[in-house]
Image (cartoon, helix red, strand yellow):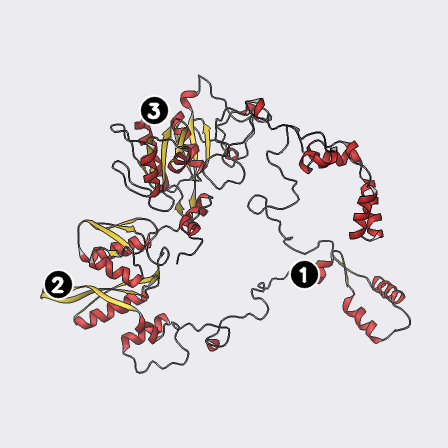
Amino acid sequence: MSLTRPARCMFCNLSRAASAAPRVPRRQFHPSPFRLNDQKPKDPAAVPPVVSQNKPEEVKMKLEEISRTMKPESLRPYTEEERAALAEVYSPEQIAAIEAGEAAIDPKDMAEQFGIRSDPMRMKYLDDFSHIEPGVDKNKRAPKTNSDYQQKMKTEDEIVADFAKYMMETPREDFSVEHFIRFAETTRVTKGKEEAERNPHSAMAPDFFQQGEKLREMDDEGKEGLVADESILKPGASLEKEAPPLKQLIESTGLSKEYIGGLYTKVLVFHTVTNQTRLGKVQRYYSLSVAGNRKGLIGLGEAKSFEAADAQEQSRYRAIRNMQPILRYEDRTIFGDVTAKVGAMDLKLMTRPPGFGLRCQSLIYEICRAAGISDLAARVNRSRNKMNTVKAAFAALLSQKNPEDVARARGKKMVDVRKVYYSGRVQ
Amino acid sequence: MSLANLCHVISHLNNVTKARLSLASIPNTKLHLKLCLALQNDGFLSTVVRGGPTPPEPHHLLGHPSSQDIEPVTQSNVASRRLWLGMKYWRSEPVLGKMTMVSTPKRRVYVDLPTLRQVVRGNNTPYLEGLRSPGESLYLSTDKGIMEARECVEKKCGGLVLCRVR
């Protein structure tokens, strides 16, 4: 709510302020202020002519017009034809109830309630408030608790009285033991709200599952109705034969050996690094790898070792361990242009149309391949250090903004026009 | 229309969002007010309240005004008025992202409608980069008021480009 609008018009709907602030209707899906069409037509001649007077009065009045010019006199009893029409739908008792109900309402009240309000306190929009509009109205919630502070146990006399009443009401002919059992099962032992006894508050966790649902268990994998997740390690699978680094990876991630084998991994940067100590130079191998499942999951891993193969293997495994999801637009490119900066690297990834391909340098190409991105352009500015290029590209892919989050944060509706145009048939 | 003051406002708002503050105050001018209202209309700001040198009462910011409490702007107090802006954050990230000036006091950038159409579609133009990222906005000062670029295209008017919000 903005207070910059002057206060003089607080109670005056008839003369609006000259637009000191944008007029915002309650439900707004567009940034432009809503123009209320409250101006009278400038040219009186342009007004469409009134309906010709040959037809009878009842025919030309629409419901909206009736409700606008509602008067107590316009309420009249049913004609014979209308009665006949009612009789087709309702039973005589129902018709009698309808007439009694309508007779109970004062015509003056009816005219006031049914007519469209014209007073200065009226709403600025047409609504009879008979429905709850999600997004506009507050949610209608169930009561938070069923507890009743007035709840009391019934005394012995009251239970006896209940029993006596129950016996009196049961028909004598088919009296049997079942009636006693039913009384014992259905009678209430407390006074107060019925829900308080039948459905009391519980400190137990609520029932999360629908009928027949349960937590997914390892043994159920692949059974009917359940899709087997190939990535998860099967229980009881033997890891004895695996090499220690792979075994450690499987144990720490819980991924199956086949899934790990199917992942795309690649060593991107590999060189020696030297540590100068008092005793001389200590040379080791450095490796930076990327891993991905080509479906939006990528990770980077770094490792150093005295053995070249060891460093490469270790970095691959660390990349698999570091895998995390990134956003992909239509499973082919990224959401918008993203930039990232690592050290002196200044890198920009740009979204591109379908069929554009990966027009970028080799390192970014490999990362995109691992992630399953097929349309992208990249620009690497300033420094072109290989290690930092990889890290910056990874950071840039992670820094994408999800349009849904943007919409939620701003409280605005956002629509992907591409999906609208192709009626959802993209990807 | 002082673009120098607007530059100060924009860099102040950038500092405010970096510091994750909930309330910011900027000098009260018609340009700042119109821009802030446009930002509020697009959901970047929660509240825009005109107040004095001290922050307004919380019930103003929460959107429950009472007409007696609003101090009218008079000749004697107009110099001390400030705009108090309620900043928004979503999942600990600022909703109002990085703001940058497009026009500067030294070089004002005007766009006509055909250019603006290109910009809104995401194409780069000689003086103005396209709106390419999701949620990116561009604010223009036109003869129909300060508006977002897409709205300018809708209303078929170009104008002076003020700032970009990423």
| Measured Cα–Cα span from mark 2 to mark 1 | 71 Å
Q: Amino acid at mark 3?
A: Met
- Residue wearing tag 2: A274
Q: Position of residue A176 (x, y in %)?
A: 86, 75
Q: Are marks 2 and 1 in contact (CB under 8 Å)?
A: no
Q: Amino acid at mark 1?
A: Pro
Q: Position of residue A403 (x, y in %)?
A: 40, 49
**Label 2: few (<14), some or many (≥20) within 10 Å?**
few
- Residue wearing tag 1: A200
SS for callout 1: loop
Front residue of A166 and A216? A216
The C terminus of chain B: image quadrant: top left
SS for callout 3: loop
SS for callout 2: strand
Q: Evaluate whether label 3 is on the same chain as label 2.
A: no
Indicate which label's residue lies in the foreground, 3 or 1.
3
